[in-house]
Amino acid sequence: MRLPHVPGSGMRLIVALLVLAVGLAGCGGSSAPKTKRSQRGMPEDIGGVLEEKKFREIEVALPPYPADSALIEFLPRRNSENHFYIDRNSISIGSDRVVRYSAIVKSPSGALTTSYEGMRCKTSEYKVYAFGIKNGEWTSSHDTQWRKIPKASGDFRFALYKDYFCDVVAIAGRNEKDLIANLTGNPLNNVTDKNR
């Protein structure tokens, strides 16, 4: 089959029309910006859990001073001459997902260091709210910044983070009762050995 002779300007017109037709075909559909579709209607974050945009800490009230009868001894990851305790009555999980607790460190000479602290499992951070002083009273901490938990086997906070309160980046339990069970060595189906 022979094509009819098309003068030069006619050929340019045909090529321009073809280019225009192909360009318009590629523009089909909405001009709205494309968004990533979530899987099964879940948020785009991992596991369907909304990403923490900005952390908002709840207002914290200091608990009653720890009573000896409520202390649970726990072990750090490395041997220490000190003894470490958590006041079972002070353990709480806030709506801000912070685990709060009173910690007591007892030296071989009997000296006590008592503090009320918070731990954020998601960010591996801790904060000291107050220190215990004589006569069973609290004094507010001057340094109220969140600090990274030292990755040292002798640090009691590292042991609390890895072995008792946190499970990677989540809290190692559904409630305070589960965290107490972790401390007493009777996990109620929550903590696995993947952190140890």
Image (cartoon, rainbow, N blue to C red):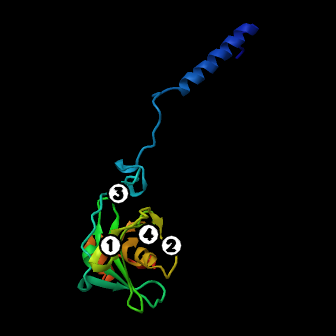
Q: Earlier in the sequence, mark 3 or mark 2?
A: 3
The residue that mark 1 highlights is 101
At label 2, counting other C-alpha atoms closer than 10 Å, the crowd grade (few under 14, some 14-19, many 20 or more) is some
Indicate the position of residue 13 as horizontal and vertical percent values: 67, 11
* Residue kind at label 3, given as amino acid type: Glu
Q: Do the residues labelled 3 and 2 touch (CB within 8 Å)?
A: no
The residue that mark 3 highlights is 57
* Residue kind at label 4, given as amino acid type: Val
Q: Residue at x 24, y 76 (%)?
A: 89
Q: What distance separates the C-alpha of mark 3 from that of mark 2? A: 22 Å
Residue 167: quarter of image: bottom left
The residue that mark 2 highlights is 150
Q: Is the N terminus in the top left, top right, bottom left or bottom right quadrant?
A: top right
Point out which mark residue 168 bears: 4
Mark 2 lies on a secondary structure that is: loop
Q: Which of marks 3 and 1 is nearer the N terminus?
A: 3
Q: Which residue is drawn at 42% across and 44% down?
A: 37
* Residue kind at label 1, given as amino acid type: Tyr
Q: Which of 160 and 132 is in front in this view?
A: 132
* Residue kind at label 2, given as amino acid type: Pro
Q: What distance separates the C-alpha of mark 3 from that of mark 4? A: 21 Å
Q: Which of 96 and 194 is in front in this view?
A: 96
